[in-house]
Image (spheres, grey):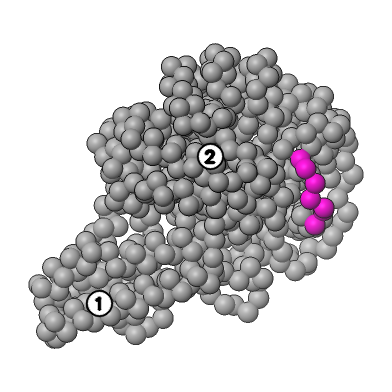
Amino acid sequence: MTSSRTASLLQGIGIGQGVAVGPVARMAAPLPAPDDAPSTLTVEAESARAQASLGRVARELEAKGQAAGGAARDVLEAQAMMAEDPTLADEIASRLADGKTAEWAVYAAFASFRDQLAAMGGYLGERAADLDDVSQRVVADLLGVPAPGVPNPGHPFILVARDLAPADTALLDLDQVLGLVTSDGGPTSHTAILAREKSIVAIVGVAAAADLADGTTLVIDAAAGTVIADPEAAVVAEAQQRIADRLAIVSAPIVPGSLADGTPVPLLANLGSADHVDEAVALGAEGVGLFRTEFLFLDQALAPTVEQQRAHYVKLLAAFPGKKVVVRVLDAGADKPLAFLNDAHEDNPALGLRGLRALRASEDILREQLTALAQADAETNADLWVMAPMVSTVEETEYFVALCREYGLKTPGVMVEVPSSALLADRVLQHAEFASIGTNDLTQYTLAADRLLGSVGAFQDPWHPAVLRLVQLVGEAGRRSGKPVGICGEAAADPLLAVVLTGLGATTLSMSPSALADVRHALQQYTAADAARLAEAALSADSAAGARAAATAAVAAETPAAAHPNTTSEAAPTAAGSLPTSGAASTATDTNLKEATS
């Protein structure tokens, strides 16, 4: 694997904590825009062509979704609905009436809607790529040519693309695709969502990905968000050793989460649908630490009925008999607007009417949700906990707890996502039965950096000592009150940070199911006293990078690790979901701590 070229380092947003090594295979370029020449057919004939093609693509996407299952099915069914959206059909019809071809009418109508979504930004902005994919498939069908798709070079490879369509991501051959690198997309894109679900090592938002040529060897490090092109042999060998370590971790027996001294730290799953519970159980989830109910509401013209919600909650709770299941009531607004909840324009929606604030303004929706949860709780024997999002005051806590009690829900709690609730955690926990820290939003609000805005992405690091200090305040309040404090943000999926969070007072950790094995392994390497020492080291730093480095140094000082054995530089391309100490390239800690896939 020697090369006369100099290794280059590219930066992006890592999905998970994995590492992969292999050659580049690039996604085929998208189809060019169709010709805008007038049609030689009648409007009726072109309309029939367009309708038939839209229908064929919708059925194809539905079939792919059924084959893929899980979150991929939900995504692909949503795409199928896009293909047959009545508003889009009207846009296409208006262009056909102007004498355009079906190809041009479809292309132009989808492009118009794409631009509208992209302008909205956030969650909806990242759905623009989904429209692009549907448009390409319909145009390809009309032209009678294959839609652009995943290449097949005949050997394992790292796929490089502008972005990846959900239909392609859902059906990737994981024996061939070692990892993904995209120039577009963010942490909430469907590429990222499906990569997490399938435990694919991925780096999105790599601006220079277009410069990576077919056949170039890459080492991609999701934990650090880096892509190394033409790496040195030693870098390849180190990555391959981490891959081997990861395989040993994921094959270890599943046991309850705990520290080395036996201190229990239950490991729970973050879920967005009851359809995904089987995978979580299989990977060792001891319950659910965050069930995101907003996915029942998104893409709906009206709120789902009590009965529709109840059925979904029953399915969820029935999968975890006797186990803790924490359900978050509807968290909408900001990047997840809902027309029936709050469709008013806000210049800064992240600081606007979102979360519990929006629910209080439309209390009937909250009451219906609590009714459905109470009914599901009565039908099952899981241990149901219910929490409110975006709680910023003690008064809001009192309001939500009282409402839950009115419906007979025994364990109401709050999410700590803004500094005010962390600073007053002792008073919040006088009313709430538990607190769950959402580190994604807590980091956003503490560092005043929109977590969906790439230009300030460097601030979105939960290792920052200011964030850790707020976590410590909540943990201390939990200890004094005797009430549990969980972590349900992506920080819990980082194994070294998971140990630090435990040292700060977290009593449970909730994460993407694919991260459970690595976090379980990491916790087993440290006692409660060790975790407290790592937390103290991280708090002593002045920056996120400094906190990570301080914790890493504390690990190395306590348990010197053996050096990696030498390996050849000509090893076969490989991939795994694990890297040491949050992507810090420290060989000293490889043996002691392996990173998780989030």
Residue 531 pos. (x, y %)? 77, 28
What kind of secondary structure does the magenta stretch mostly adopt? loop
Mark 2, residue position: 327
Crowding near pointer 2: few (<14 within 10 Å), some, many (20+)?
Answer: many
Answer left or right for 326 relative to 349.
right
Element under label 2?
strand
Give 324 or 205, whichever is nearer the viewer. 324
Residue 145 pos. (x, y %)? 37, 83
Element under label 1?
helix
Location of residue 247 with respect to 321 vertically, above or below: below
Residue at x 48% of width, y 68% of height: 65
Q: Is residue 593 magenta?
A: no
Residue 27 makes an appearance in the image: no
- Residue 180 lies in what quarter of the image? bottom right
Residue 22 pos. (x, y %)? 66, 65
Residue at the far front in the pictured view: 378
Location of residue 151 with respect to 227 vertically, above or below: below
- Residue 528 lies in what quarter of the image? top right
Q: Is residue 252 magenta?
A: yes
Q: Which region is colored magenta?
A: 251-257
Mark 1, residue position: 51
Location of residue 303 with respect to 178 vertically, above or below: above
Residue 245 pos. (x, y %)? 80, 53
Q: Given this view, does label 1 or label 2 mark the residue nearer the observer?
A: 2
Crowding near pointer 1: few (<14 within 10 Å), some, many (20+)?
Answer: some
Residue at x 68% of width, y 43% of height: 322
Residue at the far left in the pictured view: 98
Ranked by sequence position, the earlier of labels 1 and 2 is 1
The disc labelled 2 sits on which kind of residue? Val
The disc labelled 1 sits on which kind of residue? Gln
Residue 574 makes an appearance in the image: yes
Q: Quadrant of the N terminus?
A: bottom right
